[in-house]
Structures are given as C-alpha cells and as structure tokens.
Image (cartoon, rainbow, N blue to C red):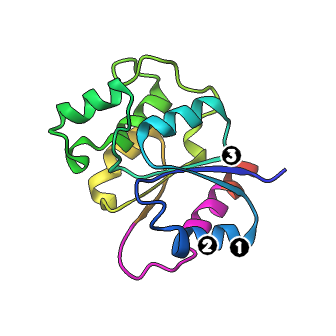
C-alpha cells in the first residue's frame, strides 16, 4: 500500500499542475487535498496519514468553532493563521482551540509546513510544536518542491 499524504492548502486546486503533478507522476504516495480547516479536520479524524502538509493561511470552512476563530481574528486569513491553530490542536490537544480530541496518530515528525510566511515569522511556534520541516512559498521554487518535502518526511518517519 502506498503511503498516504494530506495537504491542507486553500489554493491546492490552483497548484495541481505545477506542485501536485510531480507527486502524482512519481506515484510514490496517495495525495489527498483539503482546502479549508473544517475539511482538514474531517479527513484527519477519519483517516491516518503518513504525512501531513499544512499551509498557515487557511479559510475556516463550515465548522462553527473554526468560523469563530476566524471571526475573532477579523475574518482575515493572514491574521487568523488557522493552519497554526490546527497544528497546535493536533499536537497539544488544546480544547480551547477545538473541543474534540486530536487523532492519536499525529506526530510532529510527520508534519511539514508549506506557506508564504518566512521561517523567522514561524520559528517560535513551530519550535514549540516540535515541527522541523518547513518550506516557504517563494517565486521560482522547483515544481518538485512538494514532492521533495513529502519524500523527506516519509524517509524520516520510516527510520
């Protein structure tokens, strides 16, 4: 069975050709996309994944709790940083973020952050969560960047 990967990214459909293409082409894993936090949580609680890739700027989706976090941040993806809230809940189980317990399979070693925020902006929260795999979205990244990130996480978790 192929390793499974969940990418929680609001512009994933726009990234299908250039970033997802190499992942699909290699056939090394099964990639699932979630375009908002609500869908991400639904998939994360229904399935175990070998790798999780998360963007920081995510829309809330339809879940009232995520909508509340979003509204409390001024209904702005940049300020809300729901991807970080999602990661905080997944790793700490903080009921102030989300009432349900996170899935037991989640491990920081399986998680990568792929976002426009710089490493400097995210170093403190990612360090607190134990997440070391990070890639900033900048112009002229190779089309294989997502696939490379996934393969690196798979190699790390296999050993």
User: Is 17 placed above or below 135 here?
Assistant: below
SS assignment at label 2: helix
Left or right: where 15 falls relative to 152: left
Give the label on residue 128, or none: none
Q: Which dot, 3 or 1, sits closer to the camera?
A: 1
Q: Is 147 covered by the magenta stretch?
A: yes
Task: Please tell me how crowded label 1 is: few (under 14), some (14-19), or many (20+) other residues with Cα within 10 Å.
Answer: few
Q: Quadrant of residue 60?
A: top left
Q: Which residue in the rendered view is the most extreme toward the front?
A: 62
Residue 62 visible in the snapshot = yes
Between marks 3 and 2, how big is the CA–CA gap? 19 Å
Q: Earlier in the sequence, mark 3 or mark 2?
A: 2
SS assignment at label 3: loop
Task: Please tell me how crowded label 2 is: few (under 14), some (14-19), or many (20+) other residues with Cα within 10 Å.
Answer: some
Q: Earlier in the sequence, mark 3 or mark 1?
A: 1
- Are circles 2 and 1 on residues that touch, CB within 8 Å? yes
Q: Position of residue 139 (x, y in %)?
A: 36, 79
Between marks 3 and 1, how big is the CA–CA gap? 19 Å
Give the label on residue 25, or none: 1
Give the label on residue 50, or none: 3
Left or right: where 50 falls relative to 123: right
Give the label on residue 21, or none: 2
Report the residue at 14% width, 39% height from top: 74
Task: Please tell me how crowded label 3 is: few (under 14), some (14-19), or many (20+) other residues with Cα within 10 Å.
Answer: many
């Amino acid at each position: 069975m192929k390793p499974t990967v969940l990418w929680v990214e609001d512009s994933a459909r726009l990234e299908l050709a250039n970033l997802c293409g190499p992942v699909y082409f290699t056939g090394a894993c099964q990639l699932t996309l979630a375009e908002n936090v609500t869908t991400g949580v639904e998939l994360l609680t229904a399935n175990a994944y070998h790798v999780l890739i998360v963007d920081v700027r995510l829309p809330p989706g339809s879940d009232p709790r995520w909508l509340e976090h979003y509204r409390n941040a001024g209904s702005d993806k940049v300020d809300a940083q729901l991807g970080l809230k999602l990661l905080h809940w997944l790793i700490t189980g903080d009921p102030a973020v989300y009432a349900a317990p996170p899935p037991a399979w989640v491990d920081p070693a399986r998680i990568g952050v792929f976002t426009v925020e710089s490493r400097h902006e995210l170093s403190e929260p990612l360090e607190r969560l134990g997440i070391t795999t990070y890639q900033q979205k900048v112009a002229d990244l190779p089309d294989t960047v997502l696939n490379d990130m996934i393969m690196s996480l798979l190699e790390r978790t296999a050993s």
